[in-house]
Amino acid sequence: MGITFHFEGQLQKDQLPTALQQARQFAERNKWPFVEIPEEERMLSRVRDEKDWDHLGVTLGIEIYPDENCEPLRLEFDKVGFIQEYVKTQFSPLTIHVSIVKLLRELGPWFVHLEVVD
């Protein structure tokens, strides 16, 4: 079984720019490369109650590369600030896993709710 955690949540109204800026700053402090996810229409695969619940619409975000042995951390939000993602940290150092959880905790105040299943 891989070491993967899932997270989902809803940003507070108008907090997307703030959350993305904080994620950028966190990546820069940790010397993690990242790329911006431009605002454009995309399909996001989502699941609700064990059924596909895909989103087609405008998204915006950032993709962060914490470690070469870790999947990218994709923080991609739909137009109302909802996110549902996961990241596998199985092959990276424990410090990477802990740092990603720390980033999500730092972003927590900008959310109405944020659930992280670690």
Image (tube, rainbow, N blue to C red):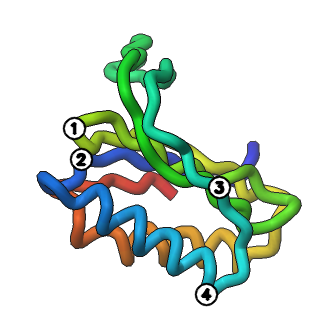
**Which tag, 3 or 4, sits closer to the chain's start?**
4
Image coords of residue 75 (percent x, y):
49, 51
Q: CA distance from mark 4 to mark 2?
A: 25 Å
Q: Secondary structure at mark 3?
A: strand
Select label 3 or label 4 by which is in front: 3
Q: Amino acid at mark 3?
A: Val
**Horizontal side of residue 64 vs 62, given as left or right:** right
Cβ–Cβ under 8 Å for marks 3 and 4:
no
Q: Residues within 10 Å of mark 2 (few under 14, many from 20)?
A: many
Q: CA distance from mark 3 to mark 4?
A: 15 Å
Q: Which residue is mark 4?
A: 29
Q: Amino acid at mark 2?
A: Gln
Q: Residue at x 72, y 81 (%)?
A: 31
Q: Which residue is mark 3?
A: 35
Q: Which residue is mark 1?
A: 80
Q: Amino acid at mark 1?
A: Val
Q: Residue at x 48, y 73 (%)?
A: 103
Q: CA distance from mark 2 to mark 3?
A: 22 Å
